[in-house]
Amino acid sequence: MKDAQHLIRVVIIFAAAIAGFLFVRSLLVPPSFGKLGHYRADAVDEFAQLPRHYAGEPACKKCHAQQASDKAKSGHSSISCESCHGALLAHAESPKSADSKPRKPKEAEVRAFCGNCHGKSVSRPAKFPQVDLEEHNRGMACNQCHQPHRPK
């Protein structure tokens, strides 16, 4: 029994450490954590209260049917309009307002803008359309040959 005392002390220390950890965890973990998965359920309501910026694809299609039709038949069909043109809720709510115009890259920016997605990169899938921006039609804007809503 004399030799077992050191084991009892270690067990008591471990039990105290575990109890301390559980107590501190109960103070730090929000009550809504885990109710809807591995996150804080209250965050859903908090995010819903934030101001919106994006209108969504259906809002674009209401006024821009031709562009939406062209895009739907192209390789860009799965990409939201707002991925390229920026957040458009203000534009959808007030289309005539000068400060709510959709972003359209300037001629000098087009090549770099398209290169964000289509520049050659080993990290992209081999079948994804990529170009070497240093070699492919050097100095030309992409939209001189490719219409963005119908890129082929």
Image (tube, grey):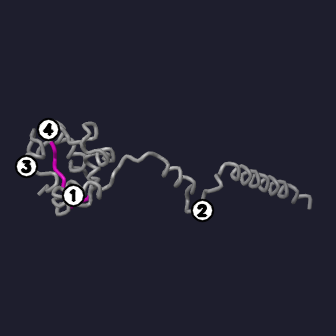
21 relative position to 62: left or right: right
**Callout in the foreground (3, 2):** 2
139 horizontally vs 130: left or right: left
Of labels 4 and 1, earlier in sequence is 1
Q: Nearer the viewer, residue 135 or 116?
A: 116
The tag on residue 35 is: 2
| Mark number displayed over residue 76 | 1
- Give the mark nearest the N terminus, 1 or 3: 1
Q: CA distance from mark 1 to mark 3?
A: 16 Å
How far apart are labels 3 and 4 at the CA level? Answer: 13 Å
Q: Are marks 4 and 2 in contact (CB under 8 Å)?
A: no
Q: Residue at x 80, y 57 (%)?
A: 11
Q: Name which residue type carries label 4.
A: Glu
Element type at mark 2: loop
State the residue position of label 3. 145
Residue at label 4?
107
Secondary structure state at the residue bearing disc 1? loop
Q: Nearer the viewer, residue 122 or 77?
A: 77
Instruction: Please tell me which of labels 4 and 2 falls first in the chain.
Output: 2
Where's residue 4, x and y in %? 87, 60
Q: Position of residue 26 (x, y in %)?
A: 70, 53
Q: Which residues are magenta?
A: 125-133
Cα–Cα span, label 2 and label 1: 37 Å
Coordinates of residue 111 in the picture (x, y in percent): 16, 42
Q: CA distance from mark 4 to mark 2?
A: 50 Å
Task: Assess disc 2: are there few (<14), some (14-19) or many (≥20) residues with their C-alpha within 10 Å of its C-alpha.
Answer: few
